[in-house]
Amino acid sequence: PSVFDEENIAACSLSGKHNAAEKLVKKINASPLKGNSSVLEIKVESPSMAEAKQCLESIFEKIRVTQKAIKEPFLEEAIQKIRDYDVKLKESKSVIARADKSNNALSAAYLATRDEVRQLTDEIMDLNDFITAGENRRAKLISPIYVSDRPVSPKKLIGLLVGLLGGTFLGILWAMGRKALVAYRN
């Protein structure tokens, strides 16, 4: 209930109702898609098609904004690391250039600096890949919001009949099993 804000509550027509966020949780069914945990399927129970669509759009926008807020600090940290690595990379390249001019290309400092340049270049490429992946993996609708024009309601009569028949069958089965056990003991 604490995830949903007033915009979500209003979009789902629960404004001003007691425990609106808790009612909204009961109204929404969100589950990961089988076989692909990065896809979320959201279902909403609502008396009208327009209200269901408005509610789903509001919830999707909440998910999109929340995901963006979660990844922003990581992306900013990666960008800052790239800046720092670029500074170190320029310093290391200048050390290598000076060593090349002075014919000290085989010194230990030269070799260590050359390895550092390789490592920094790899780190910068990895961070750039991370940033690109973060930008490409933002929340998006895979398929448009679908609202059925046929209302769906619980089938209470069918549930009641299945319960009665199942209970009767289990009762008869239990009685027959007990009778068979008594006959077996005798």
Image (tube, rainbow, N blue to C red):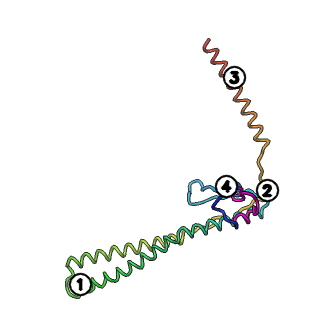
Q: Is residue 143 magenta?
A: no
Q: Which residue is mark 1?
A: 99
Q: Is residue 108 left or right of residue 79?
A: left
- Label 2 vs 3, first from the N-terminus: 2
Three-letter code for the amino acid on which mark 3 is drawn: Ala
Looking at the image, the residue that sits furthest to the bottom is 101
Q: Which mark is residue 150?
A: 2
**Circles 3 and 1: CB atoms closer than 8 Å:** no
Numbered circle sitting on residue 175: 3
Where's residue 112, x and y in %?
Answer: 25, 75
User: Which element is circle 3 on?
Assistant: helix
Foreground: 8 or 98? 8
Task: State which region is magenta.
Answer: 8-23
Q: Is residue 111 left or right of residue 55?
A: left
Circles 2, 4 touching at the beta carbon (< 8 Å): no
Question: Along the polypeptide, which appears first: circle 3 or circle 4?
Answer: 4
User: Horizontal and vertical percent for residue 7?
Assistant: 70, 67
**Mark 2 touches mark 3? (CB < 8 Å):** no
**Local crowd size for mark 4, using a 10 Å CA cut-off: few (<14), some (14–19), many (≥20):** few
- Asked whether residue 131 appears in the rendered view, the answer is yes
Q: Amino acid at mark 4?
A: Asn
**Disc 2 crowd, CA 10 A, few/some/many (<14, 14-19, 20+):** few
